Amino acid sequence: MYSKGMSTSERLIESTRELLWERGYVGTSPKAILERAGAGQGSMYHHFKGKPDLALAAIRRTAEELRATAEAVLGGPGTPYERIEAYLLRERDVLRGCPVGRLTMDPDVIASEELRAPVDETIAAIRGRIADIVEEGKRRGQFAPGLDGEEIAAAVLATVQGGYVLARASGSPAAFDAGVRGLLSLLAPPAPGQEN
Amino acid sequence: MYSKGMSTSERLIESTRELLWERGYVGTSPKAILERAGAGQGSMYHHFKGKPDLALAAIRRTAEELRATAEAVLGGPGTPYERIEAYLLRERDVLRGCPVGRLTMDPDVIASEELRAPVDETIAAIRGRIADIVEEGKRRGQFAPGLDGEEIAAAVLATVQGGYVLARASGSPAAFDAGVRGLLSLLAPPAPGQEN
DNA sequence: GTCTATACACGGATAGAC
DNA sequence: GTCTATCCGTGTATAGAC
C-alpha cells in the first residue's frame, strides 16, 4: 500500500501496474486496486473513467518503462553480439514474468484495440531495434550473411518471452537461463581457435 | 454448446478445456462452463467438487493431448534436425496460443501445486524429448558438439511459447513464423556448398 | 443425475454528501 | 478531491425437489 509523496492518481496507477503484472487484467478488480492504493471508490472514478481507462494509463507507463530499459542495454557499448547478449542476460525477475508480454494472454486486453496498442508497439519497437543490431553485425562480419535481422530478432524476443513461460511452469528461473544460453550458443560468433 | 453423444461430465470437461484456453482460469466462471456444456449447476457439483476440481480434470486432459501431439512429430521419421524442424513447423492455431503454456500466466494455477503439476510435467517431458534428439544429432555429427541438449531444447520450446506472445501482441501469426524461421536458420546444419 | 431455488460476497459503476 | 452509500449483475457454492 502506497503512501509516500505520491498523489492519489499516481498511487492508483502504480497499484494498477503491480496488480496487472501479478494477476493480469481479468484478475485485477477495482476493489483490489483501491485497497492497495489506500483510496476510496470516489477517487478512482474521479480521476479515471473506469477500470479500462485506469488500466490503459498503467499499461502505457509500464510499456514505456520497458522500452527504456531495453534501450538502455541495446544502445549500450559493445559489438552487436555483445549488446544482444547483454539484453538476454540483463537482470530480470524471471518468475514474475514480463509485465508487458503477460498482457497478451489476457483476452480482454487482446480484444481491446486501445489496450493492445501499447503492448504491440513496445514489442515491435524492441524487435526492430534488435533487428537493426543484427543487420549491423552482418555488415561487420560478426553474424552470418544468411541470417535475417527481423527473424533473429523475433527469435531473441520469443526466447525471452517463452523463457518466462518455462520458468513459471517449473517454478524456477533455471529454464529461462537455459533457453537464453541455448540461443546464445547458436548465435555466438566463432571465437578464434574454438569449436563453436 | 455440446450435445453429441457425450455424457454430461464429458461435456463439462470439454467446455472447461475450451474456456481455459480462451480465457484462462481466472477468466473462466462455472456459469460460463455450464452454459457451454448445456448443463445445470447441480450436474457440475455432482460430478466435481467445484471449479478447481473440474479445471484439474480439464488441464490434465489438455496436457496429455499436447504431449501426444508433440510426440507424434518428435517421434516421427527423419534426422534429428528434421524432427525438430517438424515440431517447430507443425500446424498451430497460433493466435489462440498454447493451451498449456498460457496457464503459466494464471496466478491461481501457479499458486496451486495440483493445477501446476500437469503443466510442469508436460513441458518438462517435451523438453527432455527434444534434448535427447539434440544429443542424438550431436552424435551423428549433425549438430555442433559444443551445443547442450537441454539448453537447445529450452530455446526451442521458448521460441514456440514466446512466438505465441509476439503473435498475439501484433494480432498476426507472422511474428511466430519469423521467430521459428530465425531459430531454424541458427540451428540448421550447413548444407553442402551452402553459406548457412 | 439433473434441475431450480436460494445464498451471499464480489465486480464494476453511480449518486450525492462533505 | 475524496468519502460513504447504494445499485445490480455475476461468481461460486449449497439445499432440496424430481
Image (spheres, coloured by chain):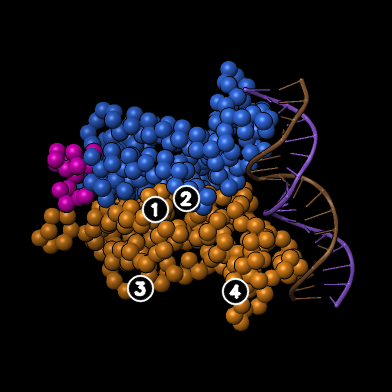
Chain colours: A blue, B orange, C brown, D purple
> Was residue B13 drawn as part of the magenta stretch in this picture?
no
In this rendering, do the residues under marks 2 and 4 share a single chain?
Answer: no
Q: Chain of mark 1?
A: B
Image quadrant where residue B130 sits = bottom left
Residue lying at the far bottom in this picture: please name it. Answer: B5
SS under mark 1: loop
Q: Chain of mark 3?
A: B
Residue at horizontal 47%, vertical 66%?
Answer: B67
- Tell me if mark 3 has few (under 14), some (14-19) or many (20+) residues whose alpha carbon lies within 10 angstroms of its own: some
Amino acid under disc 3 = Gly
Instruction: Give how far apart the Cα atoms at labels 2 and 4 are.
Output: 26 Å
Front of the two marks 4 and 3: 4
- The residue nearer to you, when weighing A131 against A57, is A57
Instruction: Give how far apart the Cα atoms at labels 1 and 3 are.
Output: 32 Å
Q: Is residue A52 above or below residue B181?
A: above
Q: Is residue B24 something that shows in the picture?
A: yes
Q: Which residue is mark 2?
A: A110
Query: Is mark 2 in CB contact (under 8 Å) with mark 1?
Result: yes
- Tell me if mark 1 has few (under 14), some (14-19) or many (20+) residues whose alpha carbon lies within 10 angstroms of its own: some
Q: Which residue is mark 1?
A: B171
Instruction: Give how far apart the Cα atoms at labels 4 and 3 are.
Output: 33 Å
Instruction: Give how far apart the Cα atoms at labels 2 and 1 are.
Output: 8 Å
Q: Is residue A57 left or right of residue D8?
A: left
Q: Which residue is mark 4?
A: B2
Residue segment shown in magenta: A133-148
Precedes in sequence: disc 1 or disc 4: 4
Q: Is residue A132 left or right of residue A105?
A: left
Amino acid under disc 2 = Ile
Q: Which residue is mark 3?
A: B76
SS under mark 3: loop
Q: Position of residue A181 (x, y in %)?
A: 35, 45
Q: Position of residue B73 (x, y in %)?
A: 38, 70
